[in-house]
Every structure is written in C-alpha cells, then in structure tokens.
Amino acid sequence: MFQEKEMHKIIEARKKYEEDIANLLTTSPELKSEYKTLSRIPVNRLYTPADVMESDYMRDFGFPGHYPFTRGAFLNGYRARTWTRRPLVGLGGAEETRQRMLRLLEEGATGVSIVGVSEALLWDSDDEIQIGYLGKNHIGMDSLADFEALFEGVDLDKISVHLNTWHARGVAMYFAMAQKRGYDLHKLRGSCSNGYNRDCIDVIEYCARHVPLWNATYIDVRNIRDAGCTAVQEIAFAIARGVDVVRDVIARGVDVDTFAPRISFFVSAHSDFLEEIAKFRAMRRMWAKVMREKFGARDPRSWILKAHCQTAGVALTAQQPLNNLARGAIHGLAAVLGGVQSLHICSFDEALATPTEASAILSQRTQQILTYETGVTDIIDPLGGSYYIEALTNKLEEEAQKIVEIIESMGGAQKAENWIANQVWESAYRYQKEIDGKERIIVGVNEFVTEEDVGLFNISLPVTEYDPSVHQKQIERLKRIRRERDNAKVEEAKKKLFEAWRKGENIVPTIIEAVKTYITGGEITRVRYEALSEEVYWHPSPWLRSKC
Amino acid sequence: MSLKHKLKLLLTKHPYDGHDAGYQVVARGLRDGGVEVVLGGPQLASEIVETAIQEDVDVIGYRIMSGESMMLISLLFNKMKERGVNIPVIVGGIVPQKQISELKKLGVLEVFTPGSSLDSIQNYMASISHKL
C-alpha cells in the first residue's frame, strides 16, 4: 500500500527505533518477559506499515458489504440499523420467561434469545433427570402448550426471536404454534440455533423450501470458546463446522444460494480486546473465501458471515462480581468494533446464578451506552487500517487456516470432533495453569483479592433465589396435558414419527404435525431412540456433550 | 506434588451440566497431582453410586453448576443409603456461600467454588489422602 521507497524508509527507521529500545531496556526493563495475545500469538511493541506490506487493500480489506467483507458484513455499518440487542431469556417456566422477555423488550431490547428450550424438551418434567435443574438450568417446558403460554399475546411479526434449540422439535413447536395462530410459515421470521445431526440438517432443508425467511441454523462456536479454546481455534472451528454443514445440505441436492444466506454464526467476545476485534474481521474474510471459492456460491449474501455474539461467560468471575460490569462492557465493545449483527452482554451476576431482572436490565443499559453514547456506531470498522489490527487479522487467518486444514484432512468437523475436543481441553488447561501461576492476572481471583467489591458499598448483592414451586407447577401442567389431550392422536403421531425416522424422511413436517397433538419432548426422545438407537445428547458437541 | 497415600476419585457431573471446561481441567489437575481419576462423565445419582461401588473409589468429586447442590447431594446420599454405602463426597461448582456450611452438615467433605486454583485442590487431596 506504500511506495517501495517509502517502505524502505519506514523499515530503516524501524531498525533505528528498535536499537533505541534495546538501549532503553538496559536501564528500564519491561514488565513482562513475553508479550502475546490470549491465543498466545507473540505481539510486537509497535506495528508499522511494514507489518502489512504484503497486504493488498482491495484484495484483503476492501469495503464494507463487499467481498471479502473484512471491513464489515453490510454496506452502511450501524448507521441505518444498529446491532440487535438480543438478551438471553430463560428462567423458571414459560410464564416467568414470558414476563422477563416482555420486560426486557420494554427496556429497549430489540430481540430475544430464548434459552433452555432444547434441554427442556429432551425429557419430561417428572423425569428424575430434571431434579435440581428444571427452572434453573433450563425452562420448564414439555409440549406445545408451553410454547403457547410463552408467546401468548405476543405478535410474532413484531418480535425478533431466536430459539436455542439443538434439535428439530423445538423449532417445530414454534412453527406449529405460529400456524395455529394463523401465521404463514413462508413469511415467518426468526432464527434457531440448530446442531449437526440429521434432524438439524432436515431443519435447514425444510426451511430453505418452506420457511424461507427463517435463519435456520447458526454455527455455534461461542460455546466452544466458553469451554476454553482460544480465539484462533474459535475462528477455525467456526469455518470448519460451517463447511461441514454446507457440505451436508448441498449433498441433499439443495442449491447453496438458497440456504447459505440463512446461515449465521454464534460467537464469543473474550478479554483480549484487540484480538477479539481482529477475530471477527478474520472470520468474515475466511467465510467469504470459502463460500465463494470452495462452494461456488454466486449470491453475495451467501458469502457474508453474520454473527450473534454472546460475550464470554468464562471470562466472568464469581469473586468481586461487580467487576463483571466492566468486563461485559469491554467484551461488548470489542464485538461492536468487530462488526457483529446481534449481541448479548452477559450479566454481572452470571457466575453466581441466573441473572436477576435488575442485572438483565443493567446488561441492556450497557448495550444502550455502547449504542448511544460512545460514538462507535457512527464510523464503520473504525479500527480498520490500524497496522496492528490488520497485521493481527492476517495472522489470525493464517493460524486458523492451518487448523481448518487439519480438520478437513480428518474428513471435516464432525469426524474430527474428538480431536477438536482435546484441543479445546488442552487450551483450557493451559489457561488455568497460567492463572494459577499468575502469568495471567485475573482481577479479584489471583490478584487484588483483599476486598469484596460488593462489601465495599456496604450492601448485599441480590442473587436469584430459585422458586421451588416452579418444578411442581410444571409437573402438574404436564399431567393435565397428558390427561386432556387426545391420546389416540398422540399414539398415531408416535407411529408416524417412528416410520419417518426409519425411512430417513425429512422429519420436520412430521414433527410439526406431531407436536400439535401435544406429544411431549420426552415422548419424542423415546420414539427417536427406538427408531434410530442414537444416544441422546442435549448438545451435539463433545465439549458440551452430556449424555442424557 | 505427590500423594503419600494412593487416592482413587470418581469425577462426575449431572447429565444436564453441559459446559465442561472446569470438569476436564480439574480431572487433569487431579491426575497431575497423583490422584487416580475415574471419569464418570454425566450421571444420575443412582449411576454415580453404582460406578463408585464398582470402581471402589475412595471419594466422589461431584460437579454441580445449577446452584441446587443441596437437592442433588441429598438425592445422592439417599441413593447411597439405599445401597448401604457411605462414600465421601467433594463438591465443585456454583455453590452459594451460605449453602457451603449446610452441605458440610449433610456430610460433604469439602466444596470448591469458581476461582479455586488447581494447587488448592491438589493440596486438599494430599491432606485427606491418608484419612480415606
């Protein structure tokens, strides 16, 4: 980007500068023996045009909304539309979740992400597995009746809903509820998480044909990040898993451009501020290349990596919890400077319990401060062109690409799952050892531990107290549903599900019809197991895998 | 560090405890500290007791992240009673401060909350290894 002569001058001046530094260090040593990012990429003290001399502006950076999307997914950044402020909502049962959802929308959230649906619909509320977890870890939900209660009186056209579902039944219940209320699936908007088993690929295929405005899958790497991997690994796993999903759907004869624009990514934002910003940029550029060059997508919308970010829960601390307010703001700012489309900032009390209503609102306020007060929405990719950010973006891509190639050589992300899991655990262990050895300082955990922050204010922190009646209430509703529904229809639905799974048909239309009989999640699980003998997991990944 | 006495521990968690970075890190930390670790993975109370008996472990490490450790620990102790065994239990995870003493009253040996260093867990194991 600079003339050769100019570059030569910079390189020479840089050498001189380093000599001066070397002299300085004899009398004024540096605070750390080694400087590296959270992904352990060594960093220099200073970056100059010489660090990006191999880059070509139009080829590598370009313009927002244009290939390779390094500078942003969309043309006009946050000027016409800021990111969706999409808090996670999920506590107690359907009623409690509905109430929290409406309150947060009233307080300025522009979307919601319903969490705890997937787990709830694996086993019925009166199953032993639910003890100690229903209403805390996930919502109390069993059947379509709970979806009807959750969205009662809510105009589905006016709300941006994301469903955290890793199987077909959750999204099927939402679709069935929408149909029963007279919505046309062809016009229904919203999104779901989705996993990688055949039911999940069924969802993508079904939506491409029948629910075209529904964002049918997002590639979850946020939860891998929270399991302890690095930013480089997060990028690599995102691309590798995305490639796997696209390959599977194409194998069913679906044209790439009919479904790829409806894929999005679920990503984290951790503590290394600048590395996180570069991460989002590198991820977008890599995805664009993969979609255009590897899969031959022609529609530019297929090339765009759209991201929902949930800031890192693993970076928050149970000690001195108020400090998490500062952490959340910094994580959120990184996501915004990295150009995400949707954001949830973890509440400061998340390391202690399900956030209280007050702390969930406070998390909204943090997002609103970022939106309205900081000015960062006015300029697109304001850190683009920073020698460090660009050099780091290049480096992250280069390192992540190596991992993507290893995974591809193993036959793709699903086949390489165990290898990936071991990589994640290795990173998590190293991170913990760094904290234990004080190579990495975590404020309030291994340094500055003397004062409790809440205590400083002479107050006690209200933490969510779980309502013990939620579980019993849900069991009663479940019993009522089982009593009042037409059980002959449920049995008929079970047979149809069994047949469809056995025959390998796309399961979604059958599940949509089945859930209208008020068949429960636990019943669906049993039929599926009888038909396929596949083990039951609440999440499809080994690093989150819990055999239920 | 090394243990003077051999210690065999069943490390387990609830099937709904998905995120398992801490579980894996602690497992490795314990092994590095000389503890023989049986990875039980996700298990219900009755399965935990059966595994503990079959593997003849000295102690159970139960990871609980839902904040409802009282309920789950009571369930576990009840299952032990039914099987006529009494195996010591250590809890790791999200445990509200005021519940820690209540858990100990129920018979839990020790509780490790978020932020505990691997060293502190290893040292604790060394301190109890001769008693179990």
Image (cartoon, coloured by chain):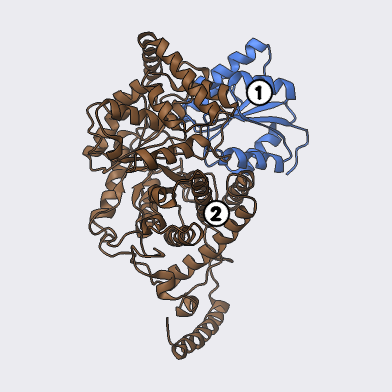
Colour of chain B, in one word, is blue
Relative height, residue A265 to residue A337 (above, below): above
For the residues labelled 1 and 2, the Cα–Cα distance comes to 38 Å
Left/right of residue B130 with respect to residue B92 in the rendered view: right
The answer to whether one can see residue A63 in this image is yes
Chain seen in brown = A
The label on residue A233 is: 2
State the image coordinates of residue A37 (x, y, percent, origin top left).
Answer: 52, 61
Location of the C terminus of chain A (image quadrant): top right
Disc 1 marks a residue whose amino acid type is Pro
Q: Chain of mark 1?
A: B
Tell me which residue sits at (34%, 27%) in the image. A176
Q: Residue furthest bottom?
A: A5
The answer to whether one can see residue A131 in this image is no
Count of numbered marks: 2
Relative height, residue A304 to residue A187 (above, below): below
Q: Which residue is mark 1?
A: B88
The label on residue A209 is: none
Tell me which residue sits at (56%, 38%) in the image. B20
